[in-house]
Image: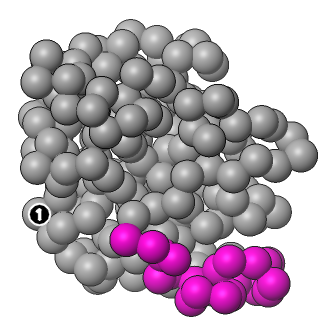
Amino acid sequence: NIAAHGENIAKVVTSGGISAVVAALKARRSSTADVPACCRTLWNISVAAQKDVVEVAKVGGIEAVVEAMKWHTSERFQEIGCGTLGAMSRGAENALRVAKAGGIAAVVEALNRNRSSACVQEQGCSALYFLACAAEGEVAKACGIEAVVAALNSHPGSELSKHGAAKPSGSSPRTPRTSSRWSRPEAWK
């Protein structure tokens, strides 16, 4: 992930890298290796500067992440997808862009499909927190409240219950944690 560090993120953005990453994400729909890396790059770009989410949206990046979540249903990818959409949703205008692109439904589906994964639940609830700041009614219509309550009930001792189900523990979604089923790439540490 070339956009894992601040100085590289700026270079990716100024060199037209957002378009390249989104094009790669769209072209590699069936690749299990490249799609998570593309989403993680968009996550890092979105956390670094919310203004860049506008560029991601212009080139279809939000829709590409939502579509990738439909094709890549592994727990690992759903965590990354929820984290990416959450990072893209900080700020009212960006949250509305994500909501309009189907991001709320994608996150709720990930939460419902991965109830046993505390990592997916944490990222999904964080994403719904940011989305609800601008599109609370849409989150409710998509059964987001029920998904958050189910997450709390499924993981009573997790970060969800320590920090509030839909309130992220920091100013941005958390980096995926290592679990027994997969290890975090070196660039994420």
Q: How many marks?
A: 1
Q: Residue at 19% of width from left, 50% of height from top? A: 49
- Report helix, strand or loop for mark 1: helix
Label 1 Cα crowd, 10 Å radius (few <14 / some 14-19 / many 20+): some
Q: Which residue lies furthest to the right in this view?
A: 180
Q: Quadrant of residue 27?
A: top left
Left or right, residue 10 beside residue 23: left
- Residue 157 seen in render: yes
Residue 22 lies, with reference to residue 39, above or below; the image says above
Left or right, residue 133 beside residue 141: left
Left or right, residue 101 beside residue 171: left
Q: Quadrant of the C terminus?
A: top right
Q: Quadrant of residue 157?
A: bottom right
Q: Residue at 71% of width from left, 44% of height from top? A: 75
Q: Residue at 46% of width from left, 62% of height from top? A: 173
Provide residue 25's location: percent of width, then percent of height.
39, 20
Magenta span includes 172: no
Q: Give the range drawn in magenta.
A: 152-171
Provide residue 136's location: percent of width, then percent of height.
30, 82
Q: What residue type is labelled 1?
A: Glu
Residue 156 lies, with reference to residue 32, above or below; the image says below
Q: Quadrant of residue 159?
A: bottom right
Judging by the rendered image, the residue that carries numbered circle 1 is: 93
Colour setup of the view: one colour
Residue 129 lies, with reference to residue 79, above or below; the image says below
Q: Residue at 58% of width from left, 13% of height from top? A: 31
Q: Nearer the viewer, residue 120 or 15?
A: 15
State the predominant SS element of the stretch in magenta: loop
Residue 151 lies, with reference to residue 49, above or below; the image says below
- Residue 150 seen in render: no
Q: Which of 177 and 140 is in front in this view?
A: 177
Provide residue 71's location: percent of width, then percent of height.
56, 30
